[in-house]
Image (tube, rainbow, N blue to C red):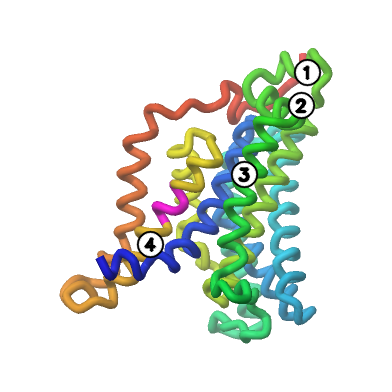
Amino acid sequence: MIILLQVLPVALRAMVPVTLCAVGEITGERAGVVNIGLEGIMTLSAFAAAIGSWATGNPWIGALCGMGAGAIVGLLHGFISVYLRGDQIISGVGINLLGMGAVGFGTWALWGAKSPMLDKKFWIPEVPGLGISPFVLMTPLLVVLTWWLLHRTALGLRIRAVGENPVAADVVGVPVEGVRLLAVVFGGALGGLAGAFLSLDWLHTVSPTLPAGRGFIALANVVFSKLNPFLALLGGFLFGYFDALAIQLASVAGFGGGIPYQFVRMIPYIATLAVVALAIGRARFPKALGQPYRRE
């Protein structure tokens, strides 16, 4: 029980990138566009955030740089998927490869062979008096705002309409391409914020493998959530909790010594697979998901 309670603060941090990416992806998929390039978005955004913080000396400006980088990558994916009607899966794979290659070269060019550890003055400071990351407080707020956007605004109705029936939406005057592009850019911006969190708040470094599969876990969280931002918050916390538990168990005698560390670190991913296996048959996705719209 002591271990289960000790991991809670780490679990709250670990839920942030998975939840932010999942909520952003939910918005894009509601509009009918799939983006499996979340891993690449986080990698590129973490690098951009570190550069921005290092160049300006202000970590919050760095976080905005990371968010902007994610939005730009989302814009690129949206342009390819929506206006050029390219294959959305291939575009997402390209983003992941771009993230690994560009950040790998960038870190080597700027800092040499080793991944840099950022100086403390470039970190996002904790909330005074609470001792927790501001991203932990920000994430539930963004979840609520995204749910409100999708279900309580005219723009949200348009986003859901172009995902379900773009032909009908076009007939009543909804700009299908523009709405889809906006949704993908919004999703990229949230993914960029997740990347900035990784480099400036949690891990304090930059590397081509920094997300460590969290982008793909976020995709699994989208399935688990059935495109509901509140369930995505729950799924993000579950993964974060198992992730923190695995880290803690790896340092406990009998686990870290008797069982290889790599096996213990598999716990959150195995738990994610189990949860998704139970939820995947019940998830309902928009009818036009992944289908480019062509006006006849």
Image spot of residue 268 (x, y percent): 35, 57
Compared with 131, 42 (above or below) is: above
- Residue 144 is marked as 3
- Mark 4 surroundings within 10 Å by alpha-carbon count, few (fewer than 14), some (14 through 19), many (20 or more): many
Q: What's the amino acid at mark 4?
A: Asp
Would you say 9 lies left or right of 267 here?
right
Q: Is residue 21 above or below residue 231?
A: below
Badge 3 density bin: few <14, some 14–19, many ≥20, Cα 10 Å = few
| Residue 207, visible in the rendered structure | no
Asked whether disc 1 touches disc 2, contact meaning CB atoms under 8 Å apart, the reply is yes
**Which of the two residues, 99 or 202, is positioned nearer the viewer here?**
202
Front of the two marks 4 and 3: 3
The percent position of residue 150, horizontal first and vertical second, equals: 66, 33
Which residue is depicted at the point 63% across and 76% down?
128
| Cα–Cα gap, marks 4 and 2 | 39 Å
Residue 280 is situated, as x and y percent measured from the top left of the image, at 39, 33
Residue annotated with mark 4: 243
Would you place residue 29 above or below residue 133 in this image?
Answer: above
How far is disc 1 from disc 2 in space, using C-alphas?
6 Å
- Of marks 1 and 2, which one's residue comes earlier in the chain? 1
Q: Residue at x 58, y 39 (%)?
A: 26
Nearer-N-terminus badge (4/3): 3
Determine if residue 115 is in view: yes
Real-space CA distance between mark 4 and mark 1, rounded to the nearest whole angstrom: 44 Å
Amino acid at circle 1: Asp
Q: Return the residue at label 1.
A: 170
> Which is nearer the N-term, disc 3 or disc 2?
3
| Quadrant hosting residue 279 | top left
Q: Which is nearer the N-term, disc 4 or disc 1?
A: 1
Instruction: Kindly report the secondary structure that dominates the magenta region of the rendered protein.
Output: helix
Disc number at residue 199? none
Query: What span is colored magenta in the figure?
Result: 235-239
